[in-house]
Image (spheres, rainbow, N blue to C red):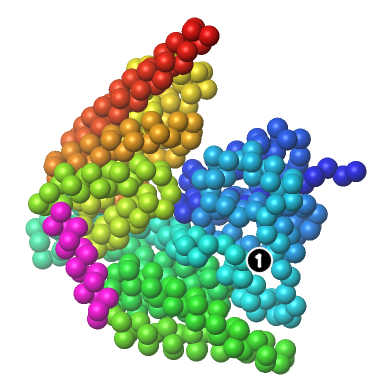
Amino acid sequence: MSKFTIVAATGCPTGIAHTYMAQEALEQAAKKAGIQIKVETHGQIGVENALTTQEIKDADAVIIAADKDVHAERFEGKRIIDVSVSKGIKDADNLIQDAINGKGKLRVVTNQSNENEKNLISEKESDKTSIGRLIYKHLMNGVSHMLPFVVSGGVLVAISFLWGIFSADPTNAQYNEFAATLNQIGGLAMGLMVPILSAYIAESIAQRPGLVVGFVGGLVANNGGTGFLGGIISGFIAGYTIFLLSKVLKGMPKSLDGLKAIFLYPVIGVFVTGLLMVAISQPMEAVNVGMMDFLAGFQNSNPIVLGLIVGCMSAFDMGGPINKAAYVTGTALLAQGNPYFMAGVSAACIAPPLITGFSVLFFGKYYDKEERNSGLVNFILGSTHITEGAIPFAAKDPLRVIPTLMLGSSIAAILTYMFKVQVPAPHGGFLVLPVVTNGLLWVVAILVGSIIGGLVLGMLRKYSMEKSQSKVEKI
């Protein structure tokens, strides 16, 4: 009897930590259960440990633990367990057991002759996955591909300011040719944010035919001043335009398959999406400007309320939908020239792993060896803006840990806004300190929030351990 075999794919929007934590959790759970598994990762550097066609064919079950598109159409005819990447980290043992027990949804094989057509018709909407989760996965696929453009562009623009805030202006005394070149290159990279976001939302919905339509829709949105909100809407319009178009044209003769892919899909798709985006650009621009003004108003008039909101959102699910809502908003504002909002978001994302680090540093005897090691490693993860390091602590004791992380992150964000810190890069943690305005105060804000959070978490842990010990002694 051959050994039960599972293939899996993991992926998170940033492709930095969640992706590989889910991989490790699934591999360990499979090893514990005595079964074979191969996990393909969709990280920021691309697909690693790629699954072959034969490996997929031979697999008894498939686990997808991802918040982005991992090309699920490859798994047609297989029973699939499709969950969020965070569930892949927290619930790996149960996922493996569910796969062994034959749970999951059977992906129906279609009989379409053209591969692109087949991928479109059998797209994930045919499954009974919740609409909210589908929308989130499509959105996060766009965010995942967008982030490297914003990070690279933001850092280069920030570096150009080292020569002066007007170093790219040839009419100003601060002008420096090299700084102006860096500013230009960085600006071009950041300018691609909305088209890339739109293109890969559409690609997630409609596979490759949606890519060009989404990109053009994103360009129309960008030129219309609709910002990242317009990019999101254009991505979904483009994706579902192609998705519906594929159904309308599925009865055409096989000999015209090439015509559909190279002519009909892109021409009709760009026409429909482009016209719709032109029509809604003006009201969307008003909404975009209104939202930015609203956030900027909070930033200037009530940093405490804004910091509390940002801190709680960033620490609540550490890389999940709520955290990403704050992060994407900060990234969008940064791309539009507002580095203040991102400073608070970054502080709130850096704090959670540092809180766990300080907790094990101050209250080490109340943690086991594995937790102490993880906590100390979290000093490195937190310093480089990898919030996910705090997840193992939150998973073990969510009712105590998550509110404490939200408290520490909120303090860090509030102080950051009060200190008027500007962070011109959306990632990197303390590595981008040289380009941070009021960088020393930013570090102070993060440390204050993290130390307070660490002390509170440690005291809660101490109380919990002593209470448990007391019960044992009574017995």
Across and down, in percent, residue 288 comes to: 24, 69
In the displayed structure, 378 sits above or below 287; it is: above
The residue at 78%/52% (across/down) is: 60
Q: Disc 1 residue type? A: Glu
- Residue 288 in the magenta stretch? The answer is yes
**Secondary structure character of the magenta stretch overall:** helix
Across and down, in percent, residue 33 comes to: 73, 35
In the displayed structure, 402 sits above or below 294; it is: above
Magenta span of residues: 282-298
Q: Is residue 438 visible?
A: no
Q: Quadrant of residue 400?
A: top left
Name the foreground residue: 71 vs 148. 71
Q: Quadrant of residue 292?
A: bottom left
Q: Is residue 336 visible?
A: yes
Task: Give the residue at the far right of this rendering.
Answer: 1
The residue at 21%/74% (across/down) is: 286
Task: Give the residue at the far top of this rendering.
Answer: 473
Query: Which residue carries the number 1 mark?
Result: 73
Across and down, in percent, residue 102 comes to: 74, 51
Badge 1, how many Cα within 10 Å: few under 14, some, many 20+? some
Indicate the quadrant containing the N terminus: top left, top right, bottom left or bottom right: top right
Count of numbered marks: 1
Left or right: where does residue 107 sit relative to residue 270?
right
